[in-house]
Image: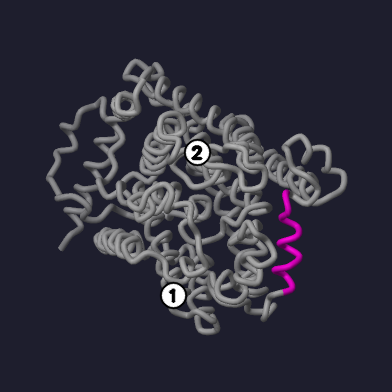
Amino acid sequence: MTSTLATLAYAIAILGLFFLNREKNEQTSKALWIPVLWLCIAGSRMVGEWISGAAAAQEVSGNAYLDGSPFDRNLLTTFLLVGIVVLLFRRRRVTTILKANWPILLFFFYCLLSIAWSDFADVAFKRWVKALGDMVMVLVVLTDINPFAAVKRLLARVGLLLIPISILFIKYYPDWGRSYDRWEGKPVYTGVTTNKNQLGMIALIAGLGAGWRFLHRPRTEAGRRKLGPFVAEGVMLAMVFWLLYVAHSATSLSCFVMAGILILLTSREWFRRLPILIHVSFFAMLAVSVIALFTDSGGGLLGTLGRNSTLTGRTDIWNLVLTMTQSPLFGTGFESFWLGTRLQRIWDIWWWHPNEAHNGYIEVYINLGWVGITLLGILLITGYRNIIATFRTKPEMAEIKLAFFLVAVVYDFTESAIRTLNPIWILFLLSIMVVPETPAPEKDLPIITYHTDKLPEREPQFQTVARARLRQRQETP
């Protein structure tokens, strides 16, 4: 099959999966496409890299981290501004959510404040604006008229776009979907991303979302499970399994297994009735990860996953960057460590030019110091508490939130995911954010007068939306 014919076939297949996965009774705002596109860019490559070509996307220089791409910056700024406009129409809900999530605001405020002592304040500020974009996109999702359906569609749309196209690139566009290992020279698969670890990351995210939706497939009017979503999620899971296999990303694979088991356990009603079981399961998986990665007794497990005792050279990087921190208390400033002379010194040591600490917590320490670590700890504690509380009101939503929370905590042991435009970080923010109940939605769509006594009996979701809009109309002066 030629690449052109394969592209046509995959396009038809993607449209077919979108059709099978649709849920007519769950309405979401058209604005949801904004965070979908934002997450797709964060999970693949910047648009400028797509335009420049496959070869240019692989080239990295020290100046690239300073200058960035004006095209990408303007595009992301446009997304950010559109997202802010959407939130202005939902300002009552936004205000309610932000008041309930003050630890996140405190963390972002400190990140903004840390720009003052950065060696590259202009670069740090631009990156903080991108980080603000991550926050805006999460708020667009959670302030949707139906947040639960919005989260499901966000994960479904991102997966249905990135996963099949990754397979298409690997099989029919090798210049885009494959590269070579810089240590052994062996071919590796990258898909729509630029490295195998990022490919494993998007497979991890899409796989957890598909598995979660598979367990909670919608029902027909007769009470039976719908066949369309069953087929769509089954195909998605099959593609995810294949990508996890070819990506050879030990971190993504282990996170997928643990988080998948956690979703299976917490989806059982008898399991949720005893909160102690949720706590034990979560912290047991966390303990296994710590023992496997950071103790001598975990050497056998690391060998099984294809890692050595240095975690493929990660411990050497940790030891060096920890000695280069100029202020242990405050750090070098928001996302400012990997710039200038510090970056050049590290690149002079390692020919493969690392640009991150490969540990999210060390990354926070070298950029934000112990103050940043303390604020991150507050985020983790309050976020976990919010998720556990969600099990009492919205257990299905709490399942995927706890899974992504576990992924974020464990993933950052060996990768730096607490950073701007990282899908793990974006989903971490989504998982820890509490969404208080609001009296009625605001004017996302034109208000229509409904006669609630004449609403169709077989459309409960339609009744809920209509009554909410009727209440708003009655309460408006």
Q: Which residue is mark 1?
A: 125
Residue drawn 50% across and 27% down? 237
Numbered disc 1: secondary structure: helix
Most foreground residue, 465 or 419: 419
> Do residues under tags 2 and 1 come within 8 Å of each other at their CB atoms?
no
Can you give x and y, in whole percent of width and height, for residue 40 in the image? 39, 47
Residue 6 inside the magenta-drawn segment: no
Q: Residue at x 15, y 63 (%)?
A: 477
Q: Residue at x 65, y 59 (%)?
A: 351
Q: Position of residue 471 (x, y in %)?
A: 22, 50
Q: Badge 2 is on which residue?
A: 178
Sequence-first tag of 2 and 1: 1
Q: Label 2 neighbourhood size at 10 Å, few (<14), some (14-19), many (20+)?
A: many
- At label 2, the amino acid type is Arg
- Viewer-closest of 173 and 449: 173
Q: State the image coordinates of residue 276 (x, y, percent, origin top left).
A: 70, 42
**What secondary structure is marked by label 2?**
strand
Q: For the residues carrying marks 2 and 1, which lies nearer the camera in this image?
A: 2
